[in-house]
Image (cartoon, grey):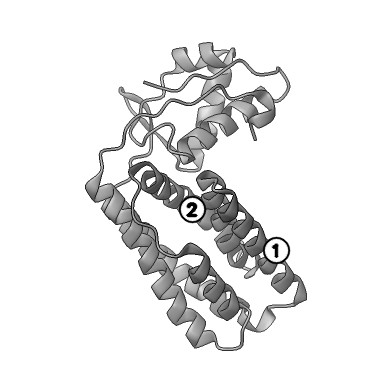
Amino acid sequence: MLPSFTPIPSVTRRDHVAAALRKSILAGQIAPGTQLVESGLATQFGVSRGLLREAIRELIETGLVVNRPYAGTFVTEINEQILRDVYDVRRVIERQAYITIWPHRDKAFRVELQSRFDTMMKAVESGDLNEEIRTEAHFHGLVYERCGNHLMPTLWQQMTQKIQLGFAICQISHAPKVDFEDNHHRFLALALGDDLNELLRELDVHLSRGLATIEFSSSNEVIPQRKLSAVLPHQVG
């Protein structure tokens, strides 16, 4: 059963619909594998099926949703093998991103990384797990944005959505969490420090720890459907 959605204003409706669905999926409110039925969703949002189809196509293009011929459209499935594949790729390209950017970490990079870290810590303190997941992705995404390879941001976007789905499973299943704040304090200090090899070693540990947490959840819990309160226009985006 899908959560309930309310009609939204006519301005930029496609973007609002796509953002509402994306937010609900990444928050674990629409479980991986759930079918997105166009007729029902179009009615809830108060939009045409054609417009809804355009919004869903945007999610398909980023890998968050998949279309199965003669079956329908479904939220991307997440399992241990997919997560291992994502983390294996992330381990290689994030390592390369730091190697590339290391001699070019200017003041702007350092200030922005610190700012994103501070925002992430505020999310941790607030107890908002969805915001914690989002801000952690934003923190780690900086090196992809600034390393100089134009493909990196796109790769990060594709990976991080699957990672966020994995962590959504964690919060649903109440998986044991590592010391998030201490681990990221250490990572930040090394990313701003002078020892590249030490940072790369910590990156391996950091990624292994994150993957182990998600794998615990996906192995030990059946993901329930969760009810989402109405998504108001000002909450979308």
Q: Is residue 51 left or right of residue 91?
A: right
Q: Up-down: is 158 above or below 223?
A: below
Task: Residue type at mark 2: give it.
Answer: Thr
Of marks 1 and 2, the one in the foreground: 1
- Along the polypeptide, which appears first: circle 1 or circle 2? 1
* Residue wearing tag 1: 115
Instruction: Identify the residue at horizontal 66%, vertical 57% (top origin).
Output: 119
Q: For this rendering, which residue is in front, 101 or 115?
A: 115
Instruction: Identify the residue at horizontal 47%, vertical 48% (top origin).
Output: 161
Q: Quadrant of residue 143?
A: bottom right
Instruction: Identify the residue at horizontal 32%, vertical 61% (top origin).
Output: 212
Q: Crowdedness of circle 2 by 10 Å Cα count: few (<14), some, many (20+)?
A: many
Q: Position of residue 88 (x, y in %)?
A: 36, 65
Q: Crowdedness of circle 1 by 10 Å Cα count: few (<14), some, many (20+)?
A: few
Residue 160 tag number: 2
**SS assignment at label 1:** helix
Q: Quadrant of residue 207?
A: bottom left
Name the outermost residue toward the right.
107
Residue 150 tag number: none
Q: Is residue 30 left or right of residue 23?
A: left
Q: For this rendering, which residue is in front, 95 or 216?
A: 216
Q: Quadrant of the C terminus?
A: top right
- Using the rendered image of the protein, determine whether residue 175 is visible from the camera's viewpoint: yes
Instruction: Identify the residue at horizontal 39%, vertical 74% (top origin).
Output: 205
Q: Is residue 68 left or right of residue 199?
A: left
User: In 3D space, how far apart are the residues under numbered discs 1 and 2 (Cα atoms)?
Assistant: 20 Å
Task: Residue type at mark 1: give it.
Answer: Ser
- Using the rendered image of the protein, determine whether residue 151 is visible from the camera's viewpoint: no
Q: Up-down: is 169 above or below 65?
A: below
Q: Position of residue 107 (x, y in %)?
A: 76, 76
The mark total stands at 2
